Amino acid sequence: MTQDRGKYDFYIGLGLAISSSLFIGGSFILKKKGLLRLARKGSMRAGQGGHAYLKEWLWWAGLLSMGAGEVANFAAYAFAPATLVTPLGALSVLVSAILSSYFLSERLNLHGKIGCLLSILGSTVMVIHAPKEEEIENLNAMSIKLADPGFLIFATAVVMVSLILIFVVGPRHGQSNILVYIAICSVIGALSVSCVKGLGIAIKGFFHGEPILRHPIFWILLFSLIVCVSTQINYLNKALDIFNTSLVTPIYYVFFTTSVLTCSAILFKEWQHMSTTDMIGSFSGFLTIIIGIFLLHAFKDVTFSLSNLPVSLRKDDRLLNGSLSSTVYEHLNGDEESQTRDNELQINESFSSRRNGSLAAF
């Protein structure tokens, strides 16, 4: 009966995690469109400290969509381990990339499509090899976990790094370096996921008649979650306003997932009872996701799609069917003039490919 219940919870958590990715992926697009509309109106941009987006309905639609996604994500953490729910956030990268190509005119080339596919495959591998977390049934057990020295050291380090990024690094490099604001969101996100997990356990206990409102840890987790989420929203808005959505979304996913997996491993001891095969599978899946996300944004300016492949093939066929026959004949007979002409052609093509951003430039 317990095993059946575990499978039931697994599928509930899986469904909630997938729906969360759909809502969150769409929210990036809505908020970005709202910020672009404000920029066209001449309002002070969020990246410059402005808050005019609070009067933009598209931004609020994006916020509500993100809220719905976070609620689904919140519920997913109550039914499934963090190492199952968090990797499925790669689906939000896929949704955001596809919608960006249609609604924000941000091109999704062949590399981006392959990257999306790799992200999905990597997420699937991580789900298959996901570690099992220690069972936590009530807030008392959660309190013991939070008081663990390893987690206390980790939480202290997170708070210190976040404060340094916010008050020292952010004002100096936040406008020019995409990693600064994203790092703030990601590092704090590790603590917010822990709060969500604890509150999910509390809510499940509430429906079983437990007096969770009288437990101090419930209010501590709730207050911490409000502070963490507010900070994440603020700095994510700045990152979206300054930098390209197709860059912000995948980088944020990599940083955020790494932070959450680290926090989950320390707090819930998810990796202690894993076999070597599952460890290798989990790391391989995560690396596959990172490679996919890298392809998604690193080659975004390269003009390359499936429609280019037949053109290349036809060119090769034309060369093989006689266009190079005279060149080959002349080369074999020592025609230096033809050889020089071919060399100049290759140099011109090389310079042209560099200007057009083709793969030869890399």
Image (cartoon, grey):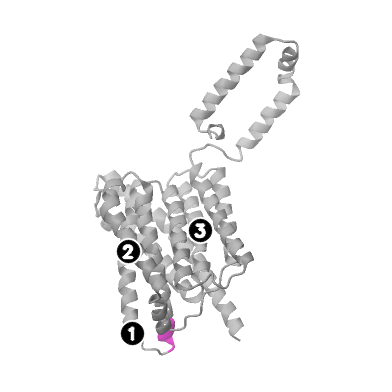
| Residue situated in front as seen by the camera: 105 or 214 | 214
Look at the image and tell me whether residue 205 can be seen. Answer: yes
Disc 2 is placed on an element classified as: helix
On the image, the x and y values in percent for residue 187 come to 38, 60
Disc 3 is placed on an element classified as: helix
Q: Is the residue marked by circle 1 packed among few (<14), some (14-19), or many (20+) residues within 10 Å?
A: few
Q: Please say if 148 is above or below 352.
A: below
- As measured in the structure, the alpha-carbon distance from the residue carrying label 2 to the one carrying label 3 is 26 Å
Residue located at (64% from left, 36% from top): 309
Residue range corresponding to the magenta coloring: 204-208
- As measured in the structure, the alpha-carbon distance from the residue carrying label 3 to the one carrying label 1 is 35 Å
Side (left or right) of 341 relative to 259: right
Q: Are marks 2 and 1 in contact (CB under 8 Å)?
A: no
Sequence-first disc among 2 and 1? 2
Residue located at (67% from left, 28% from top): 315
Q: Is residue 207 magenta?
A: yes
Q: Amino acid at mark 1?
A: His
The mark found on residue 90 in the picture is 3
Residue located at (43% from left, 79% from top): 201
Q: Is the residue marked by circle 3 packed among few (<14), some (14-19), or many (20+) residues within 10 Å?
A: many
Q: Is residue 153 magenta?
A: no
Identity of the residue furthest to the bottom in this view: 209
Q: Amino acid at mark 3?
A: Ala
Q: Amino acid at mark 2?
A: Val
Q: How many marks?
A: 3
| Residue 110 found in image quarter | top right
Q: Badge 1 is on which residue?
A: 215
Q: Badge 2 is on which residue?
A: 159
- As measured in the structure, the alpha-carbon distance from the residue carrying label 2 to the one carrying label 1 is 24 Å
Sequence-first disc among 3 and 1? 3
Side (left or right) of 94 relative to 188: right
